[in-house]
Amino acid sequence: MAQSAGATAPAAPAAAPTIADLQRQIDDLKAMLEQLKAAQAAPAPVAAAPAMPAPALAQQQPAQAAPIGVPVEKPIVVANADPAPAAKPKPKAWYEKLRLRGYTQMRFNQIVSGDADAPAGISRLRTIGDGDVRGDSNFSFRRMRLILQGDLNEHVSLYFQPDFAAAVSNQSVGERREGSVSLRDMYADVFPTGDKAFRIRLGQSKVPYGWENMQSSSNRLALDRTDSINTAAAGERDLGIVAYYTPPKVQKIWDRLTADGQKLFGNYGAFGFGAFNGQGLNRTEGNDGVMLVGLATWPFELDGLGLDGQVFEIGGSVMHNRIRPEIRTGGLSPTAFKDERVGIHAILYPKPIGVQAEWNWGTGPEFVPATGRIEERPLDGGYVQLMGKIDKSPVGPFYPFARWQYYRGGFKAAVNAPRLETEELELGFEFQLDPALEITTTYGFASRKEADERRFGQAEGQIFRVQAQWNY
């Protein structure tokens, strides 16, 4: 019994210091909790840093457990009431907002039959839309465009388009030089109210006359514009200022047609009015007057007539100008001639069949052989085009078309403003092997007077043409 008592006696002293250590730790924890509560009650916000010693203490003694019967206090977390605001992203520089795109057109022209060549003084089969329709032509680049565009800020955007497939004449005794660079567009769009429904365009841009003239060559079915409409503004562009307005309702319809794969004329506004030099593309102004031009067009949805999804668009254009044509003896005509026109257009977008037509009338300069002088003469002409749209075919989206055109009048952009007499029926189709590649094939039956006042009569013949266009 004495030995048993002696064996248990040492255990009491060993237990006593363990309990004392635990009690001391509990007291320390209670004191620390009181400090945290006091800090939380203070008016100024306190960062969470003072609470860090508690986790540190727990890490120092992970094996310690609270004795039975002692309540365990939950840790108090002090949140930061005002987190630091996130840094605003740096705005993009203007050059980071620009994008580069473009397209190239390569053509094969072949006069199958007719007046490919003729003696001096007799008209040859030629077109004003493509100088490579001639007896000795095979392959050629028609257009090679690069477009740089983008929003400089919410009020100003930039559009710059040169063409690397222009031709320069009168080189080496009249021989042409291909592959020259020519400025097509260089303008800024200004949005005064920030609303892009209204814009003011400053610089060299398209003259808002004629629906076909406004339509991009990359989006047109026929290879060339018609003589009757294009003679109003050859090259389609001039230097000046123009205002466009597109109501949101109209823009919504055009956006839907674009998504459907329709070939629109581009967003040049449902209403446009401009003032330009009036002398023509890349030509120095020849008088102190300006050319005034206006265009209006409006699409109508035909769902209420049972033609679900089909759209009919109608509108017109006006032009008031005076121009001094180039003369064969050099320089410009000493006289400025009246150059005035009015035109109408109508388009039933194909779904799957559609029709497109334009006609215009006016007065312009024209060389009169009987007098040997340029005079003001009446002009008129237009075209009618029947077209289809087949979304699915073995060769991709398929667009067949047939176009007849007619024009009688002067050509103010050519030397001495020669008279044109054009009648042509053109059959063709376009198919898109890939979104980046389009192939267009046409066969035309033409009767034309050459754009040269020294050549007389009508040239007739048939023309086979193929164009490959790649977009990038």
Image (tube, helix red, strand yellow):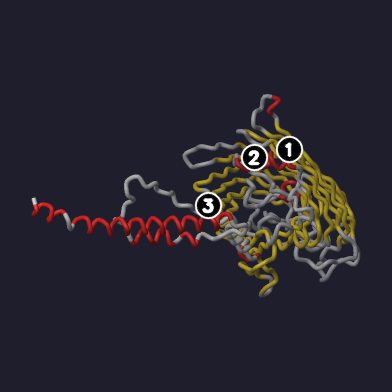
Task: Between residue 95 and residue 48, name the one nearer to us.
Answer: 48
In this figure, which residue is indicated by the disc labeled 3?
436
Residue under numbered circle 1: 299
* Label 2: few (<14), some (14–19) or many (≥20) C-alpha neighbours in 10 Å: some
Residues marked 2 and 3 touching at CB (< 8 Å): no
Q: CA distance from mark 2 to mark 3?
A: 20 Å
For this view, does 78 lie left or right of residue 410? Answer: left
User: Can see residue 449?
Assistant: yes
Say which of marks 2 and 3 sits in front: 2
Q: Is residue 302 left or right of residue 398?
A: right
In the rendered image, the vertical position of residue 426 relative to residue 28, given as above or below: above
Q: CA distance from mark 1 to mark 3?
A: 29 Å
Name the residue carrying label 2: 257
Label 2: state its secondary structure: helix
Q: Amino acid at mark 2?
A: Leu
Residue drawn at x 75%, y 50% as measured from the top left: 195
Q: Are marks 1 and 2 in contact (CB under 8 Å)?
A: yes
As helix, strand or loop, the secondary structure at mark 1 comes to strand
For the residue marked with disc 3, what is the amino acid? Ala
